[in-house]
Image (cartoon, rainbow, N blue to C red):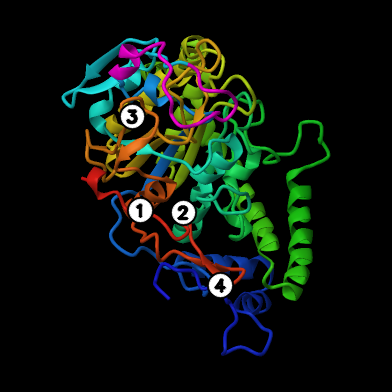
Amino acid sequence: MSDCEPQVDSASNDLPLGESRRSFLWQFGGGFGGVALAHLLGQEHLLADQPTGCHHPPRAKRVVQLFMNGGVSQVDTFDYKPALARRHGESIDFGIKAAATSKPGAIMQSPFRWRQHGESGRWASDAIPHMAQCVDDMAFLMAMASKSNVHGPASYMQNTGFITPGYPCLGSWLSYGLGRLSDNLPSFVVLPDPLGLPYNGLGNFSQGFLPAAHQGTLIQPTLPTPIANLHPPNSASYITQQSESAGRKLLEALNRRHQSQRPGDSRLEARIASYEMAARMQLSAPQVLDLSKETQSTRDLYGLDREETAAFGTNCLIARRLLENDVRFVQVWSGMDGAKDNWDNHASIQRELPKIARTVDKPIAGLLQDLKQRGMLEDTLVVWSTEFGRMPFTQGQEGRDHNGGAFVTWLAGAGIRRGAVFGQSDEFGYQGVEGQTYCYDLHATILHLLGIDHTRLTVRHNGIDRRLTDVHGHVIHEILG
């Protein structure tokens, strides 16, 4: 058992039969005193079921993942393919009778102008002009692949390493393996698209079989109530500070009685922890979500002055503030579930992709610039990802269907070699032909940068030592600085 691996059996041979350490703490310390003691022991990694630090010195302290929901077309953003223009309108046999939702059409060139940018000379399309200016800070994985070209399974795979539900996502694994950096905010926060949740809904942020305390905390900064149930509703005038205190004492007694009979129930532990965290967040969260003290130049940097970028820009700025306040993992989503308002551009690449790209392009570039100016990019890892790519041929007249064979992911910041490129797709951007990578490799690399050996962070579940990368994954050293 390594120093980073959780020990799932919390029973101690030094205690009476059937008595767990946590039950002993509850009975010894009593109520929230026991919780406080357990918390302190956990912070010092002295509880038996707590991971105990890193396997090697970390390069990154925190992570922000920008997830583009719907499947970004790689051949219209970051993967320049002149062959599409040369053979535009031709019918080419790719050896398939149908894509995810349609029959293959003719080869379609990208409708956007492409230019080289930065000292690295990376190609990027005019659909993403602001991100294009940041390519020298990025490292590109040009031959990402997925085992599914269906939104739900592919999104599960990119977030959890599996195409079926029920497994912990990356943020939950990080929360479990490394714990919190702050007592006042969660370790894992999710900022969904203001228009709605992505494919799979809350399933993408699930803790799976890990303790329930490690699920993602949902914050929606653009809503009147950004954090659900943090404060009593305005209509509940009968709830006072005194009544809340009395209610907590009653819950303390009930929870203590329930917990003493069910010491291994992580759902109750998570509920108790959530009450404690909610009390602390009532003071800390409003300050983090308050943008009034941000300068006008910072607000403009994220695009808060423009209607089309204000919503996603707000989420990116809140993400930076969360990272500043020691939230370990923040996931920011672009695109909701459904046939529109996301990156699922079946009908028309020319009309649909620029619309969604404009909402994120300036805010993402602004986030990178802001992190860099504040010195935070040195220990913050930025990951831009999507669930799959799109086909080089047409769907209908000018759309593109799902493609799990090739898409692009980029990383920037802590431990990343600026301007690096790994992998290559074929001349049409249809399949990876060199350096093909999967979510397992991406996750292994992220964990590595945070000081974790992905093969050693495991949890025994249903007789199997489960891990985020399953039985796969290699650290992509070619993109590391």
- Residue 353 lies, in percent from the top left, at 48, 16
Judging by the rendered image, the residue that carries numbered circle 2 is 174
Circles 3 and 2: CB distance less than 8 Å? no
Distance (Cα) linking label 4 and label 1:
22 Å
Q: Earlier in the sequence, mark 3 or mark 2?
A: 2
Res. 368 mark: 3
Q: Earlier in the sequence, mark 1 or mark 2?
A: 2
Kind of residue at badge 1: Leu
Q: Closer to us: mark 3 or mark 4?
A: 4
- Residue 132 lies, in percent from the top left, at 30, 20
Nearer the observer, 381 or 221: 381
Q: Earlier in the sequence, mark 2 or mark 4?
A: 4
Res. 450 mark: 1
Kind of residue at badge 2: Leu
State left or right for residue 155 relative to residue 454. Answer: right
Circles 1 and 2: CB distance less than 8 Å? yes
